[in-house]
Amino acid sequence: MKPFYLIFFLLLNSCGLLSESNKPVVYNTESFKEFKLSKAPDYTNLSSWAVHPNGDQTVFEEFNFDDSKLPVDVFFIYPTLLTDKNNTRWNADIYDNTTRSYVLGSSVKYQASAWFSTGDIYVPYYRQAHLRVFRESFWKNGGKEAYEMAYNDVKEAFTTYMKEYNNDRPIIIAGHSQGSGHAKRLLQEFFDGKPLKNKLVAAYLIGTKITNDDFKTLDLMIEKNETGGFVTWNTYRLMSERKKQKASFTISEEWIKDALCSNPITWDDNKTSNYDDHKGFLYLNNKVFPKTVKIESIDNKILVKLPKMGIVKRLLLSTVKDYHKADVNLFWEDIRLNSIERSKSYLSAQ
């Protein structure tokens, strides 16, 4: 069995879930003014969509979803996947085959899949900004422009979606990390205080900072079947101070100190949860493990214990200290069932 565990460990590492280090990352870069942006997406063409109802959806076949989808749409925006410290690009090239395969095999498969059985899902490829733009030194030297370029692609995708594909259907907006940052702007520009707000089933703004000042008419939802608002959270592993000091976190606790935070297990204002409440953690073997995650506390973030799984999986997971990458996976089945419940609630009220 040893070769199997070695291969499985390498699989985990290749997906980025175990590739952690507390050493400062030194990025290679280039002048933004000299950077040659790749060809723009054309969202009237299926090739510009990672997932589209009329496109190839074989990435979801392993989950054995049934075909009983609800008449709602899900617009999902994937997180930062352009992270290689040696890659000097400011924005991703969506026509690069390696990039496209990575989007499908990581975020689409393990994150967007949580909403696939709810309704028709749309996931645009976009020229996302490199991870280094979130460092202040790079933000001021090209990062802001790169991030704006990424959002402009997302905005164009959503505009095309509304014009060509929506057909007056209710909408779920979902994203993770950089994707949620762009989703927040979409909500501000198209939904908040606008007529389109009436078409919003829910927004899942995961792995970013949302505060009370971000929206005028969209509220944090605190009931599991509530609609027309948003949920949001950042997940951290409960650790001793000694372990925390040795860990490196994608999102600092200081940055999210004024963030709102939902409970993605009970979906109400409870600050804890029990193992029995947890619907399921999607692991990298495509299996869902229920009753494995317990929320210890919630303030501006979620603190969870090491998932309660088998010895081998628990051993592998024990090496992971930054839970940002698992914001969706930890609560995958909870999200899936909740998005269905909210959609049914929305549809029944029409």
Image (tube, grey):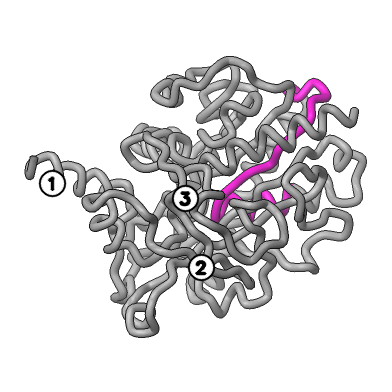
User: Secondary structure under badge 2?
Assistant: strand
- Residue found at x 49% / y 76%: 137
Report which residue position mark 2 lands on: 303
The answer to whether one can see residue 160 in this image is yes
- The boundaries of the magenta stretch are 164-186
Circle 2 packing at 10 Å, graded few (<14), some (14-19), many (20+), is many
Q: Quadrant of residue 131?
A: bottom left
Quarter holding the N terminus?
top left
* Residue type beneath disc 1: Leu
Q: Position of residue 240 (x, y in %)?
A: 38, 80
The reply to whether the C-beta atoms of the residues labelled 3 and 2 are less than 8 Å apart is no
The reply to whether the C-beta atoms of the residues labelled 1 and 3 are less than 8 Å apart is no
* Residue type beneath disc 3: Leu
**Marking on residue 6:** 1
Of the two numbered discs 1 and 2 on the same chain, state the one appearing first in sequence.
1
Single out the residue that lies furthest toward the left. 2
**Marking on residue 330:** 3
Q: Is residue 323 left or right of residue 180?
A: left
Q: Quadrant of residue 285?
A: top left
Of the two numbered discs 1 and 3 on the same chain, state the one appearing first in sequence.
1
Q: Is residue 169 magenta?
A: yes
- Residue found at x 49% / y 59%: 294
In space, the residues marked 1 and 3 are separated at their CA atoms by 23 Å
The answer to whether one can see residue 157 in this image is no
Q: Position of residue 118 (x, y in %)?
A: 64, 28
Q: Is residue 49 left or right of residue 321?
A: right
User: Secondary structure under badge 1?
Assistant: helix
